[in-house]
Image (cartoon, rainbow, N blue to C red):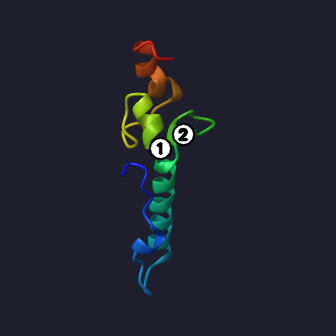
Amino acid sequence: DRFAVPPLHNIDMGEDATPGEWDEARLTLLEGVADAVPAALAYFEAQSLRCQFANRRYAELNGWTSQSILGKTVREAIDSMIENGEG
């Protein structure tokens, strides 16, 4: 199911998990939640205007994957949508 969020209990951290491993597990959970909501979400860093995060819906609406859009400027991120007459 494309709106399935990974349950927290499926993230097996064990007793010896490091703080970094917990951070990674939390990030995985938040990304799953962001992909599950029926909204396009993105975060662009204020000074550089480069994409730091985009959920799957936002990225795909603009012709990217949620990984390939990272680091793109606002203009680069939405150019494909504008070129296709969707914006």
Name which residue lies at 38% across and 28% down. 63
Residue 35 pos. (x, y %)? 46, 48
Q: Give the structural element (helix, strand or loop) at label 2.
A: loop
Q: Quadrant of residue 81?
A: top left
Disc number placed over residue 63 in the picture, else none: none
> Is there any visible trace of residue 26 in the rendered image?
yes
> Is there any visible trace of residue 71 in the rendered image?
no
Q: Give the structural element (helix, strand or loop) at label 1.
A: loop
Q: Which residue is mark 2?
A: 39
Q: Which residue is mark 1?
A: 55
Furthest residue to the front?
A: 1
Name which residue lies at 44% across and 60% down. 28
Between the C-alphas of marks 2 and 1, the distance is 9 Å
Q: Are marks 2 and 1 in contact (CB under 8 Å)?
A: yes
Task: Point out the tag, 2 or 1, that comes first from the N-terminus.
Answer: 2
Q: For the residue carrying disc 2, how many other residues have a C-alpha within 10 Å: few (<14), some (14-19), or many (20+)?
A: few
Give the left or right position of residue 24, taking residue 42 as reference: left
Foreground: 82 or 36?
A: 36
Relative vertical location of residue 30 with respect to residue 79 in this rendering, above or below: below
Hey, what amino acid is under mark 1?
Answer: Asn
Hey, what amino acid is under mark 2?
Answer: Ala
Mark in front: 2 vs 1: 2
Relative vertical location of residue 50 with respect to residue 35 in this rendering, above or below: above
